[in-house]
Amino acid sequence: MKPINRTLTMHIWSYLAIFLTIILAFLWILQVLFFDIYYEKRTTKIIDAIAYKTKKSYINEDSSFLDQLSYNNNACIEIIQNNKTIYSSNGTRRGCLYTIDESGETTNTYINDFISSNKSKKNYTIINPLLDNKTLVSAIKVNEDTFAFINASLEPTDPAISIIREELIAVSVGIYISSFILAYFLSKRISTPILKINERSKKMAKGDLDTPFVVNENIKEIKELADTLNYTKEELSKINETRKDLLANVSHDLKTPLTMIKAYAEMSRDLNKDNAEKREENLNIIIEETERLNLLVNDILELSKNESNMNELIIERFNINNEIESIIHRFDYLKEQEGYNFIFNYNKKYEILGDKNKINQVIYNLIINAVNYTGKDKKVIINLKEKKKKLRIEITDTGKGISPSEIDKIWEKYYKSEKNHKRNKIGTGLGLSIVKSILIKHNFNYGVKSTINKGTTFYFDVNI
């Protein structure tokens, strides 16, 4: 059977109504089933206490105390000595048992039973012939020829009990009806801001990322939900803007080599088909641009894998100095052809713990970034510094630096300090995004320090 979909208001109202019904039902179960039992146990305890106090009061010859004791506890007290009643409190009160008639004979068998039992104390439960109700008689031996008998009803016969029960019925009905009404309005009050947030969320799902979530309620959880959704909206706006920039920049980086490949291919076919030297030059340019396209595609795939956790880390211990020297060697063509200077500073050889291929990719991308942005001296500096059982790897350029307002944005895909996208000298523009995803996956601390017109240092800390 398909479940019935109900509104949040109906759910809250239903739960409150069910809870209220259970509370009232529990109250009436206690009243109907357990009140008499509780009353009987409480009366028994009181009668036993009265019996002890009666014995003590008789010994002290304090009859006024016995009168007060009988009146306060709605009990009948009778003291018999040598088969004669010598004291009877409230003796003519409705419900009191007459134990000895005018001829001096006992009318209740429990008296003879107790006197002949030679016990110091005994309780009897009988049916009072006057009221036809269950009555407790507590018999106690005061001395050798004196006995006290205290009796009280084990059933709540007081008219006040009936009045209380009638009032309980009226109050229960009133509370039940008013609580149902209150539960409905309370559920409306709680659900209304949530329903508003739901409507606003539907608009956000359709692409409206401008209207904020505003809640005028003093409910902490609802406010936190609105704040979370506002944060989500802001992040979605950033992602949407990044996606647009990424599409524009990738399209630019794809269009440029494709245009050049087409142009030089046509030149080789139409203009330079008889000029072997020019044709060779054109083919070399086509190969370079094809390699750039291949590098761009590989970087996009690598970034996608890192961000979707498809690449598992292979942790091992390796010599970082040797790896950095090998990476620097890959830039020898820049040294020879364009005069770049790569400076590697360290005090000793270090063994570090991490994914060797991923760490190599981080260092390679940071060096490419330094090459693209270093100053006129074309200097790139790599430093190894031991710091608190960690090894800090720094890659520094001597370029124009990064303004403080842009420091947190440089890790974004294709972010440029200039407004318009500029083609990198080498690389694809995705290097820092790949660096960030790899370092986060390693749980390594990383960052950047920059001084305007002096240069920028990227760093990260690895385990040694």
Image (spheres, rainbow, N blue to C red):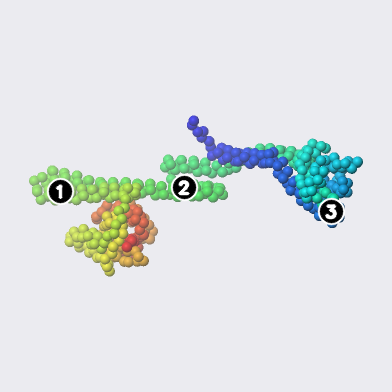
Determine which residue is flagged by label 1. Answer: 283
- Circle 3: residue type: Tyr
Determine which residue is flagged by label 3. Answer: 58
- Please give the name of the residue rendered at 81% of the width and 40% of the height, measured from the top-left corner: 109
Q: Nearer the viewer, mark 2 or mark 1?
A: 2
Mark-to-mark CA distance, 3 and 2 = 81 Å
- Circle 2: residue type: Leu
Q: Is residue 4 left or right of residue 316?
A: right
Q: Is residue 228 left or right of residue 92?
A: left
Q: Nearer the viewer, mark 1 or mark 3?
A: 3
Mark-to-mark CA distance, 1 and 3 = 130 Å
Q: Position of residue 379 (x, y in %)?
A: 25, 64
Q: Dot 2: what SS?
A: helix
**Location of residue 99 (image quadrant):** top right
Determine which residue is flagged by label 2. Answer: 229
- Please give the name of the residue rendered at 30% of the width and 53% of the height, measured from the top-left corner: 314
Residue 441 visible in rendering: yes
Q: Dot 3: what SS?
A: helix
Residue 411 visible in rendering: no
Q: Dot 1: what SS?
A: helix
Please tell me how crowded label 3 is: few (under 14), some (14-19), or many (20+) other residues with Cα within 10 Å: some
Q: In front: 241, or 343?
A: 343
Quarter that holds the C terminus: bottom left
Q: Position of residue 458 (x, y in %)?
A: 32, 61
